[in-house]
Every structure is written in structure tokens, then in C-alpha cells.
Image: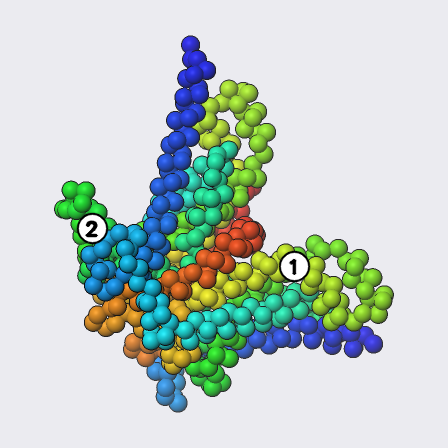
Amino acid sequence: MRTPVYYKAKKITINVLVHLLLLSVTVTCLFPLLWMVSSSLKTQDTIFKDLSLLPHHPHWQNYILAWKEGGFGGNFLNSILYTTAVVFGIIIIASLAAYAFSRFKFPGRNILFIMFMAAMMIPIPGSFVALYVLLNKLHLRNTPVGYILCMINVGLSTSIFLLKTFFDKMPKELEDAARIDGCSKLGIWWHVALPLAKPVLAVVVVFNALSVWNEYILALIIFDDRKFMPLQVALQTFQGEFVTNYPLLMAGLTITALPIIIVYLLMQKYIVKGVTQGAVVG
Amino acid sequence: MKLKSTTENYMFVLPAVLIFSIFYIIPFINVFYLSFTDWDGISRLKPFIGLANFKEAIFTDQSWWQSIGNAGYVTLIALTFQNILAFLLAWACDREIRLKNFYRVVFFIPPVLSEIVVGMAWRFIINDVDGANIINRSLIGMGLPQLAHNWLSDPKTALTTVAIVHCWKGFGWGFLIFLAGLQTIPRELYEAARVDGANAWRQFKEITVPLMIPVMVLVAILTILGTMQVFVLIIGLVGGEFAGHTSMPVLRILAAMRGSSRFGYACALGINFGAILMAISFVQYRISRKSRS
């Protein structure tokens, strides 16, 4: 006869085991990042000897060195500029198109929409070769404008999809009322539809911001000048050919990762929503 | 009036269509055109060579197939190890346990980081050449010096190490999608099963798994498409292709373009690889259709 104590003990044991699993994965997730931050506070001499997670004499100067002498400050501003410009561009361009696809009837509407959706499904792994050629021809290679336009295009299809799905479900009454009041189509889009679409706009903003901030390959092939490079590509300048200045590299990695982690922690509600919604796309 | 309205409608989609045509459609067509040429990226002439690039890629370029094999190997590890782990963790978090939200937040930190940052941070932890291999030091500390090892500079372990780091970065995606899927399963089903005397294992086997199959197929598709195209992580982690041991299809395309200035060949590789990816997702799509019905 199994007593209630047996069941209680069994339940507790299972709970402990589950937490052990979850906690060990948590430690595995966090340790590399903590080690990165900790190493960024050591010096080239102590980094291989001092194995403490909390260095006794944190060497904060590494951040100033990386920022100023490593020229990382400029690259940080580049990343901020590219991310802001691309996200802003996508919000305007994608929401205009998605609104039209959802609300208006015009010849070619379905074909155009299918075209955008097909781009989401068809992988072209070599497209950066052709983009390089194209930007060269347009004299936009090694320019911020060229990079921003390319990245707007990268985020366009998915953003149009998310926004159109949202507009399709959104009740039309408010827009109808605005039309009767004599509001233009553009006015309705700006004053009525966009404010109502805030929840999905947040998802679009967060996802595109992450993808632009973390983008690597296009920035690598488009920019020759260090002064235009975003953080991800500029990081390589710390990895010397012969000797790598590890504390500086780790400081650079921390500077690159920190904004993303902060944005993630603040906006994680929308990220979870985006992942699960994005999963429905597939 | 009608005409004016139609023009107005087109103005809404014009910016999107314009950017899309210039930066997607033109390059897309150009990839196909260039793949039939022997262009070096600079010359004015783009010598037409027919299908020679494709023939070379498919029949003679062993490094190309090696890179696809490498990607397949990493994908296999991601499909099994990473996804089983993700499922287990999601299942654990679907129960009534404490700190559920904390775990969920932490597990999705690696996926939001860039592949370069993840690669470089891990390289510092596991590469002995660079001197601060904390993993090896802990192995020695635990009295297992024979296991200490140049993980990334030994051809035998380099690719597996890459795969493990890739799983570290990627399991959070599967975890979130699995968790969302598990939460859609009505609790009443479990309660009814419990009343009927089904234990936890039978509930798992006969309720959770069958209802989750569509989600599993979806995660599998995303894992395959994502992992086959992995390469930035390797640039951060290994620095390059390591004489083919860690080469990946996209790295080969990049090398053909930047290393040997063979733009035409790079495009042919891209098309070849794109076709492989399309074939995989098509097969998976058929399977998922079948599993749903």
C-alpha cells in the first residue's frame, strides 16, 4: 500500500530533478556571458592567471580604451544609426504596403503580395554576391545609404506579412468613420490604422532591430572603410593577426552584446509573441 | 475619380515594390545570369560558359560537397541533441513550477545575441591556442587531464565543438516554440487521463507527443534551414574554414567570391545550395501535411 507520504516524496523528488536540469542549463547559458564581462575587466597580464569571476581590481579602463583608442565609439554610433534608419524605413514602407494589401482593391494586388511572400520562402544563399555587384554599379557600395537600403529590403517581406495579418483582423469601423469625416487614405493610414497597430508594430520594431544590430555578412562585403562599419564587423579589428588583446576584445564583445540584452529584457513580451507568430508563418 | 483612386492605391505599395525590385528581384535574376559566366568581378567581359560552373560544383568540387557534408553533420546534431533538449526543457517549464518565467527569459538570451559575439566569446573559453581555455582548466582541476584538449584546433573535434556551440545558441528558439505549443494543449485532457488512471509517462506518450507532432515538424524545418546556412558563428569561433574541417556551404560561396574572385562560380554554388534547401523544405512540407491529416 503506497502512503500519501510516498506520493509526496515522489513529487518532491521529481521537482528537484526538474529544477536541477533547468538550473544547470541556466548556468550554461549565463556562464559564457559572465566570463566575457569578467574577462573584459582584467588586463592582458592577468587574464590568463586570474580565474576569478569577480576580478579584484576591475580594470574599467578597457572600456574607455576600446571606445576611444579602439575606435569602437564610432562603430557603436554606426550600429545605432543603421538600426534606427532601417527600422524606421521598414515601419513606414511595410505598413503602407501592408495597409494597401489589406484594405484596397487594385489590379495586380494579389500577384504583388504573393511576390513578397515568395521572397520569404525562397532562400538564395548567394544573394550577397549579386548585391555586391549591384551596389558597385549604383555607386552605393561602401556607403551607409547602400547598406540601409539593402537591410530595409531584408526585413520588408516578413514585416509586410505580420502587418497585413494584423490589419486583416482589425475592425474597419474607425477607418470608415474617419473616411466619412473626409479624411484622406493617407490620413487614415497615419492617424487611425498605425496607432491601432501598435502591438504588432512593437513586434516588427523589436525583430528588425535585433536583425539589423546583429547583421554581419552584408556589412562585411559592403564596407571597406572602418569608419562606416557597424560593431559586428569592427570587432574583428581587435583580433590581431599575431597577438589578440583579449581584455579589449572582451570589452568590445560586451559593448556589442549589452544593448541587445537590455532591449531583449525590456521587450521580451513582444519577442515571445513574435517567435510564436513567426512560427505560425512556416 | 476611379483612376485617381487606383493611382493613390499604387502609391501605397510603390516604395515597397521599388526597393524590393531593386534589391531583391534584380540580384535574384543576376545570380542566375552570372552563374552561366566565368566573371571575375572586375572585367568588363563576362564570358558565357554555359553550365560549366554547375558541372564543376556538382561533379568535381570535393570541397563543396565536404562543406555540405559538414553542414549536414551539424544539422543532424542540432536536430537530435538541440531539439530533444529544447523539448525536454519546454515540457519541464509547462508544468506548475516556480521560476518558470525566469528560465524562459534566460533560455532565449543566446538566440538574441549575434553569431559573431557568441563565436568570439566561446572561442575565448574553449580554444587552447589562445591560452585561457577555462574548460580544459576545469577538466585538469577535476583530475581529468587526459580529456583536456585543443577542441577547436584538432580536426577530429573542431566540427563537433562548432555544433555544440551552435546548439547552445539555438535551443532557445525550439524551446519557445515547443512551450507555446504545449500551452495550447487543453489541461482537461490531462485531467481526464489522470482520472482514467494514466500515469505521467502514458499521458506524455499518448497526449503530449501526438498533439505536438505538427510543432515538432515545424521546429525541425526551422532547425534544418537555419543550421544548413550557418557560417557567421564559424567565422567568430574558428576564424575560417580550417582547411575544410569546418567549412560550410555559405563560407565556400564567400571564398569563391572574395578568395578566388570567381563571381560566376559563387553564384552557381548559391543556386545549387538554394535548390538543396528548397528540396529539403518541400519534402518536410509534404511530411507535415501528412502528419496533420
Q: Considering the numbered disc 2 on the image, is that residue within a helix, a strand or a loop?
A: helix
- Where residue A216 sits in the image (x, y, percent)? 41, 68
Regarding residue B118, the answer to whether it shows in the image is yes
- Where residue B65 sits in the image (x, y, percent)? 30, 62
Label 1: which residue?
A198
- Residue drawn at x 22%, y 60% is A46
- Residue drawn at x 34%, y 64% is A60
Q: Is residue B25 above or below residue B173?
A: below
Q: Amino acid at mark 1?
A: Lys
Give the colour scheme of this rendering.
Answer: rainbow
Q: Where the C terminus of chain B falls, by quadrant?
A: top right
Q: Considering the numbered disc 1 on the image, is that residue within a helix, a strand or a loop?
A: helix
Marker disc for residue A251: none
Label 2: which residue?
B136
Q: Amino acid at mark 2?
A: Asn
Q: Farthest residue in the top direction?
A: A1
Please determine if labels 2 and 1 lie on a single subunit. no
Say left or right for B197 vs A184. Answer: left
Say left or right for A86 vs B174. Answer: right
Regarding residue B69, the answer to whether it shows in the image is no
Query: For this rendering, which residue is in front, B192 or B29?
Result: B192
- Where residue A97 sits in the image (x, y, percent)? 65, 68
The CA distance from mark 2 to mark 1 is 49 Å
